Amino acid sequence: MSALQFPQIKISYCVGCKWSLRASWYQQEIIQTFVKNPKYENYHIGEISLIPSLVSGTFKIEVFKNLQELLENQGHLIWERKRDGGFPDSKLLKQKIRDLLFPGERLGHIDNNVKSELLITEENPKKNLNNINTTNQSQNLPNTDCKECKELNTDKT
């Protein structure tokens, strides 16, 4: 068995919402950016895990810098779909990871100013996606469960 490597990134996603492909895509984007590379020798992610969840509507990305954070489940929540109002643009996600783990480093072309109209970005924060209230106040969020998750939960009762 190999030793645990850090930092670790954990991507949790709802299986009922069928977000496994989306989670895999974010995983691949992070790997391509933060893999050991002579050009960016300071960038290194020890592990990127996909964690299927039965909790309806789950999509979150957490970073654990070291073993203590992992054992105490005290990771840094980089993105949470319900809190942040949707899914991040990969550029924004990579910048958030970089800012936490490698502050002051450049990401190359990712740091260039390019506008995206499709996903949540620094320039276009908190888009109202699918009529989800995008405020940070969780008590104001409507039920954001997907249809499939509701059916799964109904089948269990």
Image (cartoon, rainbow, N blue to C red):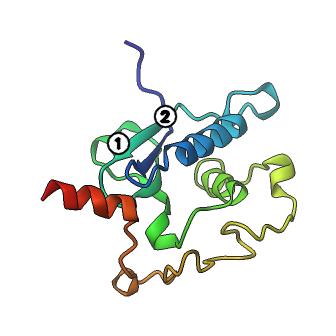
* Left or right of 101, for residue 116: right
Q: Is 93 situated left or right of 23 in this image?
A: right
Numbered label attached to residue 70 = 1
Amino acid type indicated by mark 1: Leu
Q: Is residue 13 above or below residue 144?
A: above
* Mark 2 lies on residue: 6
Taking the spot 70% from the left edge, 68% from the top edge, the residue there is 121
Q: Which mark, by number, is residue 46?
A: none
Residue reaching furthest to the left = 157
Taking the view exactly as shown, the residue that stands out farthest to the bottom is 140
Residue located at (37% from left, 68% from top): 145
Which element carries disc 1, helix, strand or loop? helix
In this rendering, the answer to whether 46 lies above or below 26 is above
Q: Residue furthest top?
A: 1
Quick check: marks 2 and 1 in contact, CB under 8 Å? Answer: yes
Q: Is residue 33 left or right of residue 39?
A: left
Q: Nearer the viewer, residue 13 or 131?
A: 131
Going by the numbered disc 2, the residue's amino acid type is: Phe
- Residue visible at 79% across and 50% down? 106
Q: Using the image, determine if residue 22 lies above or below residue 154.
A: above
